Structures are given as structure tokens and as C-alpha cells.
Amino acid sequence: MCGVFGIHGHDEAANIAYLGMHSLQHRGQESAGLVAADEKDGKLRRHVAMGLVSDAFNRDVLAKLPGRTAIGHIRYSTAGTSELRNAQPFVFEYAGGSLAIAHNGNLVNANELRAELEAQGSIFQTSSDTEVIVHLMAKAKEPDVIGKLNAALRRVRGAYSLILLTNNEQMIGVRDPNGFRPLVIGRLKDAFVLSSETCSFDLIEAEFIREVDPGEIVMIEKGGMTSHRIMAPVEAPTFCVFEHVYFARPDTFVNGKSVYRNREKMGIAMAKEAPVEGDVVIPVPDSGVPAAIGYSKESGIPFELGLIRSHYVGRTFIEPQQSIRHFGVRLKLNPVATILRGKRVIVLDDSIVRGTTSRKIVKMVRDAGAREVHMRISSPPTQWPCYYGIDTPTRRELIASSHTVDEIARYITADSLAYLSLDAMIRAVRGPLAPAAKGESPGYCHACFSGDYPIAFAPPANGKRQMRLVGV
Amino acid sequence: MCGVFGIHGHDEAANIAYLGMHSLQHRGQESAGLVAADEKDGKLRRHVAMGLVSDAFNRDVLAKLPGRTAIGHIRYSTAGTSELRNAQPFVFEYAGGSLAIAHNGNLVNANELRAELEAQGSIFQTSSDTEVIVHLMAKAKEPDVIGKLNAALRRVRGAYSLILLTNNEQMIGVRDPNGFRPLVIGRLKDAFVLSSETCSFDLIEAEFIREVDPGEIVMIEKGGMTSHRIMAPVEAPTFCVFEHVYFARPDTFVNGKSVYRNREKMGIAMAKEAPVEGDVVIPVPDSGVPAAIGYSKESGIPFELGLIRSHYVGRTFIEPQQSIRHFGVRLKLNPVATILRGKRVIVLDDSIVRGTTSRKIVKMVRDAGAREVHMRISSPPTQWPCYYGIDTPTRRELIASSHTVDEIARYITADSLAYLSLDAMIRAVRGPLAPAAKGESPGYCHACFSGDYPIAFAPPANGKRQMRLVGV
Amino acid sequence: MCGVFGIHGHDEAANIAYLGMHSLQHRGQESAGLVAADEKDGKLRRHVAMGLVSDAFNRDVLAKLPGRTAIGHIRYSTAGTSELRNAQPFVFEYAGGSLAIAHNGNLVNANELRAELEAQGSIFQTSSDTEVIVHLMAKAKEPDVIGKLNAALRRVRGAYSLILLTNNEQMIGVRDPNGFRPLVIGRLKDAFVLSSETCSFDLIEAEFIREVDPGEIVMIEKGGMTSHRIMAPVEAPTFCVFEHVYFARPDTFVNGKSVYRNREKMGIAMAKEAPVEGDVVIPVPDSGVPAAIGYSKESGIPFELGLIRSHYVGRTFIEPQQSIRHFGVRLKLNPVATILRGKRVIVLDDSIVRGTTSRKIVKMVRDAGAREVHMRISSPPTQWPCYYGIDTPTRRELIASSHTVDEIARYITADSLAYLSLDAMIRAVRGPLAPAAKGESPGYCHACFSGDYPIAFAPPANGKRQMRLVGV
Amino acid sequence: MCGVFGIHGHDEAANIAYLGMHSLQHRGQESAGLVAADEKDGKLRRHVAMGLVSDAFNRDVLAKLPGRTAIGHIRYSTAGTSELRNAQPFVFEYAGGSLAIAHNGNLVNANELRAELEAQGSIFQTSSDTEVIVHLMAKAKEPDVIGKLNAALRRVRGAYSLILLTNNEQMIGVRDPNGFRPLVIGRLKDAFVLSSETCSFDLIEAEFIREVDPGEIVMIEKGGMTSHRIMAPVEAPTFCVFEHVYFARPDTFVNGKSVYRNREKMGIAMAKEAPVEGDVVIPVPDSGVPAAIGYSKESGIPFELGLIRSHYVGRTFIEPQQSIRHFGVRLKLNPVATILRGKRVIVLDDSIVRGTTSRKIVKMVRDAGAREVHMRISSPPTQWPCYYGIDTPTRRELIASSHTVDEIARYITADSLAYLSLDAMIRAVRGPLAPAAKGESPGYCHACFSGDYPIAFAPPANGKRQMRLVGV
């Protein structure tokens, strides 16, 4: 998971991009990068660093990134490939000049394209699928950048919300035909802004204009914006439902829907689908808060903030040798005993991945005095890995892919466990007024819950991933 | 405001102290320091650094702090005196050996004692009042450390929760006769633990034993603890009520009362004292959450998380020259438009200091579409500076010391504003069963609201501070 | 100018490479980089950083570079293109696997090859000419790495001493047919070592075996070494004479000749060609020391260390606004007044580039009390830029390209100035026994003095460089 | 060993002090510190850091040290007590205001004074003897700073060249009655400058005025300088002869004598006292160079730079596990085989401490091919520890305190070894014209060679040091 941001035509482009990246920090904490196009010398200047935006940039660094157009990228921490060379935006030089690219998503045919390109003599510098796009652009015979981009996108399949920047201060936004990942357009006075989420616009006081449509290329240059279609088959939009469940910030709107309100609706639906007697409803903060409020409203059971989240959790806390039970969870969350003691506690969370964290939370809540602990998950069981940009583990590690709900309940030691049904979740996200007919907009990708993958995934040679392909 | 922590008799003393300091991080983010006593060579080793615990310490640093006893200190950021030389714990060498000291609180007669000591030839290395205590100890003729400490404490007046550490692995906890600041005792297997707050014990899985009593000295050595009285007039306890209102973590217990529950009670009382018609109750996170829940419960108006707090706010964010409205607040908080649009919004906060932040919040909520904005403050107007360890501004800067509630409401542009009454706040904190008779335990210091200062403050020569002394 | 080092088949390859790079630090202080091939997982791991080897690497970094084969690179500081992305060794992935490359030298047809490759769709990530070689290798149809390398080298012209490393732990050394830059082979027990200079072998206690011949490729794999010829026209060797004059360390041997002794011989020749009455001979340290000793021996005028060189000169010293005369030189060198006062001083230096430093030195020596200052340069006037890897300025900036020796003497305010003749310099380097017949081995490149460029240079489009092509 | 520097009355005081400290870098590399007095607010601001001046300071740090008067300190690396809290200058606050102090030297009665002060209730923050002086000043009843200083200096014994700075911009230079350590006065336009060595004046273009006399206090304030006597018994000056032998920079003058020339004279004397047949004379650079030149001149045996010193040796080089012979020495020095092969080599060094380095050098020279290696030391055997500020090891570690010259020669594996006699060394330093009568000025302290300590040293309680007291 990642975040992308761009601004075109602003006197303080790098500073604004830096704030925009900060507003997307929840989408990734591994690395942060920024490329600015200097109209004075036609150069792209780049700074990338591991870690948070606030650590990666300071006044001196920003001062060395002059120009009125800049794009930024936030990268999620994924085990194993965490290296500076994979930090985006990438900058390449090719026959067309210099080009920067920032990518949110994941290509499903990157491995085969890379093999093909290498066979033709291409050399690669990163392990990222994004580099494939630039190679395809460099090899394209089309004269202009939109033509080259289209030639490349014709070949790639998968999820991509892209922002590109040329050394001619052209900023380009692209969203794949399925529209898996969000990408929105805003205006800040005369400047154009692109971002993964609308919450960026709130911070910098930009005005939300509209989403980049699935399959659309927007070219922003010389103060104006033009729209183009990706020259590839139109797909039924399949926006990632997990953005609503967990990933996006609650104050963001996606597809015109409030993430906060959708989460609350999931909580309401949960209370209808899986009621349970209880004394108090508590969320696993922060993402579980709106669902817990919804559950409380529907059930009439009081909402309390029974778990306090620390604001100071860094990434490398040192654990004593004489180990502490639930250390990792405890550093991040602490139960409020007063709220829990002697109570039947309903805990709302957004999902269960491996089950280990949920198990620690249930135990911690019970240790704090809860009489009963009922876990309610505001989405269906996560059974399938995501191939479109969310860093889920393999099937083997997903507890729900090999265990029943009862088994999971026992594993996490909850008195009861219930997941929201797929239908109810989709209804909560789509809204009551939208017709539910298949293929109609807005459709959603729910492959992680259902295994219905909208686009086939070509497995790498080493076959590390497995998948069931349905209805593609 | 600061936090203190100590552990005696643990194989990983520095590591545990580091975690304890992390659990107190909300009490100060300016500097963090740790001193360990090595029983092998009788040496005190010290590491202090500006910033957060997680930045100040790493595995290498902790490895260089061997020993089974360690104390730590967290310092609050206060304008002007932010320097590494003021970072605690301090370590001094004197005739009695080496001594480390960590202090939460503020002495009211430090200036006159310092002048007296300097006249006798003492030299000072910090601008901290804490250094006075050590000078007085060094000059004391008593043979043992308890005697020296008592000789010093006889002279000082004010607020002090202290943890001291000698090079003989004696750990000493002290709380002033008024008991302004908290200090609690716990056990972790065979080890003794001291901390500003009980939430530290949850993290390290220590067991809460009891509070250090006002006027008590606890000496922990050779695996045992003995209790001593400060040789000074007994005072009626006057615990800082502001710890309940704002400072302590909600999952902490002070004087046996849950901070979370007390805040909720303040919200309930608020709803009774100052009801208003509204559509939604929202807190200013995080400290306002329990009060907002209480207000919602009592009023029946739905609770929502209408302001999202960022988890990634560093201390030195760079503002663009082309300034952004409410920049500082906006970096930290973002309104959820869905919740607020067209609504009559009741905002719960714990206090108003200068009024500038509240003004920005009200405007931000209204910009997000709120029809009406009603501000409810779960404490009385803050009119008087604190001389006992909380870093409040001078009277001139406290908006409530020179403006009526109506004037403040107009300034912050709220449709209505109400504060909780002093009586209701004290009742919420003390609980319904405790008799309210004056002077009875537990009494509270509420000087910042009432101007009733339990201990007189000697103003410094330059007369920068002013105060009204009442009934002492 | 740069330095390259490699070791194959040693348990502590990265540590040894780090020491080898340290021994080549005089060849470049801009950046340092190291790539290790891990035989356990077939991966190349890379660490590069700006600055000195000792700052760029520490124990933790070295520990993260496992494997029995490693190559390193030291890069010279050149104005303008000083960026981390240009720090070598580079690592690329292509159809043949992973490949690291470290390059000392400069290709003269890189611009035209790059344009040709970009037209075919190649993308570039650095502004380095070295990247061209890898692109050519990636496009080669030959099945093995030697074949691919030869296919690439057939196309490139210029100066290159290369060390390559594959993910199959093959270490490859290459020296261009002219042999402009040095490259030597050593053994450290069972391990093979490659380095720019023999002084590396002294530090790590390796044994010198032989030079890589001009036009030779040595492939080191599985503990053995095989020799191959570059499939390109054989050239008469034209080793860079400036390595002897200035660049190489005095304790290094090049072409079997001691650099120290050759510099001493230049000083002896200087004393014969340009004698002058004087009281003392002093060097500009450090490179001028052997020549000054030679001059002293031949002339009988006493040698003294009249200029002291500081050991602590960093790269970013802060100059006061109220400026200091000769600040830059003065930070580095200080005259010993006792030696100079009232004396006729003969100053030995290796070359004059712009003349500004020499002018400061002459003035400083005179300010210290010298009665006369006679400058003797142990090489001919530097009139032509180097296109083969030494970072000389353009002709316009080279004072000797537009001024006579008399004019230069006046500019630098010396009482007299003499350069060594080209013949005498070559004789000093080649030795008395070697026949001086033109074109015979060992021949030398002296283009910077004579303008006789052994290989034509293709100017870039922007035409920033100018050159006279002679006899190629 | 340390260096001190101060400047009074200059618009860029901190910048000039920073350069002055850089010029004294050879006197210590452990820590660097600077205190500036701001005349605008009467504050002393301090910055200290471990390491070199160039690393400890940058433009931002210097900008935060405003004021027209500043003092600096360079601290030598001594095992065990290397801590930031011991980095000077110290700043203290006492009844007289704020005071900064920088100290070169060592007090011999610091332990007893410290014990006395602690018994009176003083507290200490460092393990430095310097802190004693400030405590004594703070306790003095005299009204002005010169009076307080004199009161303190009446009590202390030992070696001290001090620079003090008050918050009233008074800069004070002090040199103990024996004048062990150097301290010189210069002028830079209207500003006064104090420094440990005259080489500082060369760098900043200040004019040398005179030395601070032994037993003199110079008070520089309001643009003028006044001279005062330390109110203590006048001593016969005993300037440290080791400053000439090793410590001072060769381009410095001490007591009006050139350090370079004195070292050269020692080499000449050496050639007379201990001639040996040889083919080449080489120095151990850098301190041995002038003595080797002198030896060469007197003996007629050619001087060569047979050992090359690396300019890039940091303090924490990582040694491979598979160890390298003479690793530490080899990193710093490399033999030039051409010079040494088959030769009878005479090696000039300034002193032998433990013998281990000399042994490595002899072996390295022999490994490089030398037929014979004759070691000549330009000072007598170092048999006694220094109590006056030079960081020599204890007697037990000094090889010459328990071994004869023959034994040492065998240990270091030299074919012959000779030391300069005490008389010859003193003659070289004092000059032929000065009468050698005992007690006459200038006298020298040569206790490290002779055991004749000018001032008695009071051993600490733990009795770690031993000494023979002679004729005091």
C-alpha cells in the first residue's frame, strides 16, 4: 500500500507536496520521496529517505527541490524488500527526456513483462514492478509522452494509480481501468493537485474537483488539464473495498462516500447481523472507532474508549529479554480497567489477519477484568491474498483461509466471534440507493474476502503465491 | 510537567525504565534521561537526550547503562529553557558519593534558596530548581542520605515528586506534604517500581501496591522498602485536580480514582449544568473523549468522532510561506465533514488557555459545514498560573483571567460556550460518597481555576510572575 | 579520478574491501561504495554513501554485506555532478542475472552511445558513462558474461579499468587497450585481489602478482583466474604519466616503477634543467616531497619542510565574513617562518592548474619572510584537459594554455618559475635503461601536457569541451 | 593535553574561535567546545561535542553563538574518562554571575581540594580538576573576579594555562607560576586573542604580541588589557620540554624558539652523540621529520620519506577478524619499499612510550627490505609519568622505566637504539647562547625524563600513581 501526491503550478510546490505526503502518512511509513521539476533549468531533482515524512524532509532538503511542480510518494513497510533503492518516485532518463513516476498499486503481469524486457536487453535497478512501465514507455515509438504512456499501459495489467512528472513540468495522473486504487483531483488557487485521498485537500486547503476516472489519464500542463482514455479494454470498475474497511483515513471520501460513515454503517449492520448481550462496546482504535459507534447506536449498548492507543509508538521498540506478555500490542494499546472490569465487552475491529493480534487483545481485555469478550469484525473473513497493492500475507498465514469462525473464536479465546457478511459490507459501502446489479458502477473488488479476483495474476517462477481465479 | 520512573532490583533495569518512561511520554516530550547504578563498580551512568524516548535511546545506549537499579525522567517542552543541560535526571558528586535525582513539580522558594546558596559560594550548572535540593543535601551535616534529604526538604517549599538514586543502589521516592504530583509504588516480581502513573505498571506488567503518601519518603534498598516522614509540617493534601482534567493518561488511576471515569463524570455533569440542543457531540481528541462520551450519555445526543487526530505530527513541521488557515491545528486535527455538515455540533474540550486553538477548532468545524458550534469545557475557566509544576502561561496570556465567558465565546466564535463549575468538577473527581468537607482528604489544588494557592510563591527579583495568595 | 578494489574468495570479503578502499582514499573523497556477492542466496548487496570510507562504513553496515567476494569504489569529488545516484559500484539486473560494476576512467564516446541506446528504448538512472557499458552488455546476444562484456567493450572507446561482480561470485578485471589507468592483481592466501594501486596490498598483506595488461580481461571464479583479450584493436600502451606526477600514492609501484623514486628523479632532473641559487628547498606537501628531496640532492641546497600540512582539513570549513587572505590554502598549509625568514626559497610542486593556489603559496611564503621565492614544477605546463578520467578543468581555466611561463611567473608573483621538460619527465618515469623510441612500450599518455591525445574524443552536443586531436 | 583559545572584541568571535580551535586540533581530538558571551543579553552560550572541530561545529551551530567575545577548548583523548560531561569550556553560575573556563594542564592537589570542598557541601558535576578552581572562586569573599580568581589560585598547585570568560565579556588569561603550558597573546585588528600556540595567529592573521608570563593574569575587557600577578610564591619557570619534543606544532614558536628548528637541532645533536653507519635517514612522520632532517644534515646520510602517513585515518577503523600484522600502525604508516630495500636504515622518532609501536615500525621497515634498522630517539628515555597535563601512562607501562636501552633495542628488534641525552636535549631547546645555570630562565620541566618534578603531586586515596619527588 502506498500513497501518491502531486501539485502543478505552485510557487512552493515541494513544500505543499511535503504536506500532502504527510496527510497520506497512514498509507505507508517505510519511505518517503519527492521529485520537483525546476522550470528554470529543466531538471528533475529528487530526495528519498526511509521513514516518516517528518524525518525524511527538513527545510534544507526542501530548499534544494526548487520548481513549481512536484510529486511525492509514501511507501508501505513490507518485509524483505525494504530498501532505499525501492523508494519512489523513481527518476529515469530516456530518449524523451527525464521522467519521474510514483505508483500506488501492483501489476499482476510485471514478472512476465520484466522477463521479456530483459530478454531484449533492458537492465533493471529496482525490484519494483513500477520500473516495467518506464521501460515500456522508453521503448514506445509514439512521439509524445501520452502516446508512450498509452503504449506501456496497453501491456500492463493490474492495479495502478500513477502520478508522472516530466522535465517539461507535465504532471500526469493515471488510474487503471478497474480503478482499484483511489486518485482524486483538486485545485489550490491556480494550481492543480492530485492525491490518493481527499483528506490531503483539507490540510492544504485545496478544493476537491473530482476523481480521476477508472481508465483515465489526466495531463496537467501549462496551467490546464486535458483528459485521455487508456487505450485498453474498458473494465467494470472494481474499487478496493478494503480502502473503506481499513486503509483510507476516516475523514476521506472515496467514490463520493464518507469512509467514516461507511464504517459506522458496517457497525450498524454488524449489530443487526450478530447481536450479543453486552455491557459495553469498545473499538480497537483507531480504525474500529466508527464501527463501534455504529454498533453502539444500533444496539443501545454504551460506547466507551476501553483501549487507549499510544501516540508515541516508534517502529523499533526494544523488548526486554525477560519478556512481557502481549508486548507488541501492549506498547500500542492499553486497556482502561474501569471500563472493562466485570463487564461483558463487545470489541469492534476491522479485520483479523493472522489472529495473533486479536488473541492478544482479547486476553488483555480479559486480564483487565472483563467478564465476557465478544469480538465483532466489520468485514468478512480475510481468506485470500491481495494482488492489487495491499500487503496481505499468503493464504497459509491468513487464519480464516484454513479455519472456521468457531475455530478462530477459540484461537483468539473470545466468548463469541462474528464477521460481517459480504453482502452487508457491500451494502454499507455502496449505500441503499445504489442498485446492486453486478457490473454496475460502483462495483467493488472484494477478492480478499471472496477469492473473486477481477484480474488474473501471473505467478512468478518461484511460485511463492497461490490463487484461485474466478470469473475473469 | 514531567514524569519520573524508577526500578530497583531487576536484571534489566535500564530496559524496564526505558519502557516505563515510554508509558509516561504524554507527560513531556522535550527530553528523556536515564541513570543506572551499576552494583559491580558502584558507578552511576547517565544518558540524556532531547526528544522522545524512542529517539533518545536504542539498544546500544541501553547496553551502556548496566546495573539492577535505574531511574528515568521525561521533561515537558517549555519555551526558552529548552536545553540539554536542563535534561534530568541530574547526577552530582558530593561528600556522600554520587547521587542522581529526577523531579516532577516546581519549588516555590527556589530563587531565594539559590541566592542564599550562591552567597555561600555554591555554583550552579542548570537553571533548574531541582539543583537547589542537591546543594542543600550536600551541605547537610546529617550522616546518612535520608538525614541529608530531610535536611534539604525542610528548607524547600512547593511541589515535588522525586526519585533519587545513590551509587549504593538506594532508590528513594519522595512526595511533598501537599502531594501535588502523583507518585505510585509497584512490584515487578522481586523488583520495586516507582512511577508518576499507574499506566506504567500495565505496560511492564507490574503490580500496583500503593501511592507514596504526601509527606512520605520511601527508601528502597537491598530488596526492601522502609517508610519515613518528611520532617516538615504536615499539610492537608492538595492533589492537582488538573491531572484528572487533562494531564494524566485516561487509563491511569490517581488517588484510587480512574481518570477516564472522572472525565466521563465531568461530561455528565456538564450536560446537566449546561445543556444545549444539538445533533452531535464530538470531542477534541484525545483528552476530550471520555467527557464527550459522558455528555452524550447524559444528553442522549449521539457521540461521534468528528475530529480525526493525526498520529504523525512531529514537532517541527514546515509551514509554507503562503500560509494555511489554522495550520498548526489542522496538521493535528482534521474534521470529518460527513459528521458535521448541517449539524448543531457540541464540542467537548478539557480547557481553554489562550483561546487561539479553540478559535481555530470552532472555525474549522464550522468550515466543515456545522450549522451551530457549541463549546463545552469540562473544567472551570483557567484564570491563574500554576506554580506547582504545570507549564501554564502568565495571567496576561490566560484569556479567562481578563475576559468573561461571553467575551470568550465571541472570541472563539462559538454559538455558545459553557465551563463546568468548580463544585461540579471537584464532585466528579472526589466521587459522590466522599464527604465534601473542606480540608478533608482527598483535598485538591484548584488554584489555576480559583486562585486559592495552597502554598505561597516567592516571586523572583525580576517580578515576572504575579499571584494572589489566599488562605494559606 | 577514482579507485577500484575487489577481493574474491575471502571469508571477510567486505571487511577487506573496506580496507582496500581506505588505502585508495587519496584517489577520491566524494563517495565510497561496496557490493558483496553472497554465495548463500546468490544476491548482490550494496552500500554507498557520500564522503570518506571511514564515515561511509561501520561495523553494522559491513555486517549486512555478507559473502566471500566483494568489490569497492572510491569516487573523486567533481563539481556539479556530486550526487549519491552517481556513487559506484552500480548494480543492475538484466537477463544474465545481477551485475555490479566499478569503473576508473572515462569513455570518450559515451554520449553518442547513450543517444543511440536511448533511441532504442533504454532508460538511464545515472549521468555516468559507466552505465553505457552495462546497457551494451544487457543487449549482447552472447551467452556468457565474458562474451557480453566483449560485445560491449567493442563499442566503447576511452579509458577504463573496471572491476565487475556477478551474482555467481565471478569477479572480473578489465583494463582498456591503452592501459590509461592502473589495475593490479594480488593474492591474499587463497583469495584473489584486484586494486588500482599496489599500496592496497601492503595494507592487507597481500602479495603483488602482476598488472592486468592493457587490453586484458581477467576472470576470477571458483578460486582460479583465466585471462582473455578484449576483442578490439590492440593499441600501443599509453599509461597516464600524471599518475606518476601527482595521482598515485608514493609507496605504490606502477608499471613496476616506484612512484616515489620517479618523483625524486623528476626533482633531480629539475635541478639540472632549471638550477637557481637558493638557501633552502621546500616541497608543497605531500606530493611535492620526493621531488624536493631529489632537487636538494642534486643541487646540494638543504631540504626543509617549510610548509606544514594540516591533518584535520575537512571539506566544509566555514570562512568568516571578514575574510582571511589565502584562506583555503592557509587552512591546509602553514609556513614555518624560521625556515623561510630571509632565505632564497625554492618551492617544489607537481603542477600548476589555474595558478590561484600557487599564487597564494608564493605570497604566503613571502609573507613568512622569504627573500626570494623560486617555483619549480616537476612536470611540463598543463595545457590540455584530460578526457581519460582525470578531472582537469577546461582549457580556458588552465593558466598554461593561454599564458607563457613568464606570464605565469608574474601572475603567481614568483621570482622565477620553471617547469620540467616533457622529455625529462618521460625519461624520469621510463628510466634510463628503457629505449626512448616513440611508440615503444611502456608508452605514456601525456596529452594534458602535449595535446597529443591517443584516442579521439567525441564532444557532447552542447560542445562544452574543446580539443586538438593529434596523431591518432 | 589540551588547547585553549579566546578572542575578545570581534564581530565574528565564534567563527574566529572555531578557526583558532582548528589550528590547535593537534593538541586534542576527543572533544571541542566553544562559549560565546553575548553583549546584547549578557548570556553565555555554549556548544560542546565529542570529536573534531570540523565535526562538532557547522554554520548553524556557530550562528547560535552570538557575541563579540568567545573562548574555545580542545580536549585530548584519554582512556576511561572520555565523556561529554568533561568537555570544556565549562559554564557555571555563581553569586558573581556566569563564568566559563577552559583549562590546559593538570592540578596536582585537585583531589585534596575536592575532598575539602565536598566536606563543606560542594557538589561536583564533572570528574575534572578544573571544576575545583570555580568552586574556590565561588567561595571567595573578594568582590571582583580578579580577586576571586586569585583567591582560588592561591590554593591550587600544578599546571594551568586558563582562559576564562564572564557574562560581562571579560576575557581572562592565566598561566601558572611555573609556566608549564604555553599561552600567548595576539591582536587581530582591535580584538585581543589568546591561544595555546602561535600557529593559531598565522591562520587567522593575528599579530603575535607576547607570551602570558608564568604567574601572570591578563584581564581583557572593554578593548583594553591589564596585567596582574598571581598572589602565590614566584617559581622558577619550568616550561614543559615535551612541547618542543612532540606536542606543539612545528610552525609554532614557544618561548620565542621555533619548535621546528629545535627539533632539527635535536636531530643534529643525535647525529653527534649516536652516529651510526647507514644508507638512508627516515623520520616517523610527522613529528620526527625535522629531527631526521637534522640528523641527515649532520651525518651526510641522505634523508628520505621512507614511511608515508595516511591522511584519512579515523579513530574507529574496523579490523578484520583474520588479523593483519601491525594493523594499527599499518593503517597510519606505509613503508616505501624502494627507499628501504637492501638499505641500512636510520629511523628518527621523538619518543618511545610502551615500545609496541616502535616494535611494529621496526618490523615493518625490515619487512619492506631494510638490511639494518637503527632507531634514534630525539629525547631521553621516557621513564616517569607527567602530572602536569600530558597523558602519559603509569610507570609500569613506560618501557624505559624498567628496561635498559639494550633491552629496549632487543624488544623493538632494532639493530641499534640510541636516545638523546638530557643535556643535549636541553641545549637544543635552550640555545647555545643562553647560560645553562640551574634555575635561570628559561628553565624546563623534564620530569618525564629525569623524575625531577618541580611540584609535588598529592596522590589520590586509591594510590594509583607513584612518584619520586626531587628537590622541590
Image (cartoon, coloured by chain):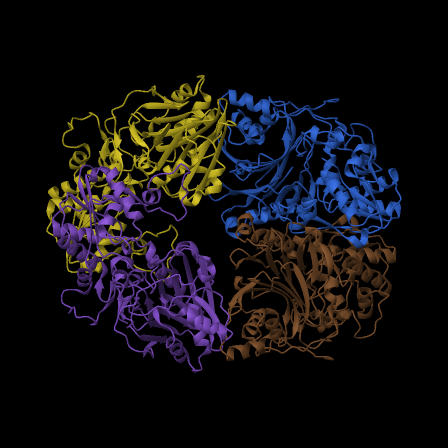
Chain colours: A brown, B blue, C purple, D yellow
Q: Which of B221 and D93 is in front in this view?
A: D93
Kindly indicate the quadrant of the structure image that contains residue B31.
Answer: top right
The x, y position of residue C338, in whole percent, is 21, 37
Residue C38 in view in this figure: no
**Is A195 left or right of B400, judged from the image as shown?**
left
Is residue A411 positioned above or below C360 on the image? below
The x, y position of residue B462, in whole percent, is 60, 22
Residue at (83, 35) in percent of width and height: B424
**Is B279 left or right of C106, judged from the image as shown?**
right
Residue C408 in view in this figure: yes
Is residue D376 positioned above or below C87 on the image? above
Kindly indicate the quadrant of the structure image that contains residue B142.
Answer: top right
Residue at (86, 59) in percent of width and height: A277
Mark count: 0
Q: Quadrant of the C terminus of chain A?
A: bottom right
Q: Nearer the viewer, residue A279 or A310?
A: A310
**Is C199 left or right of D94, judged from the image as shown?**
left
The x, y position of residue C256, in whole percent, is 22, 66
Is residue B220 positioned above or below A412 on the image? above
Q: Which of A212 and B306 is in front in this view?
A: A212
The x, y position of residue A431, in whole percent, is 83, 64
Is residue B127 positioned above or below A409 on the image? above
Q: Quadrant of the N terminus of chain A?
A: bottom right
Kindly indicate the quadrant of the structure image that contains residue C147.
Answer: bottom left
Q: Which of A295 and D172 is in front in this view?
A: D172
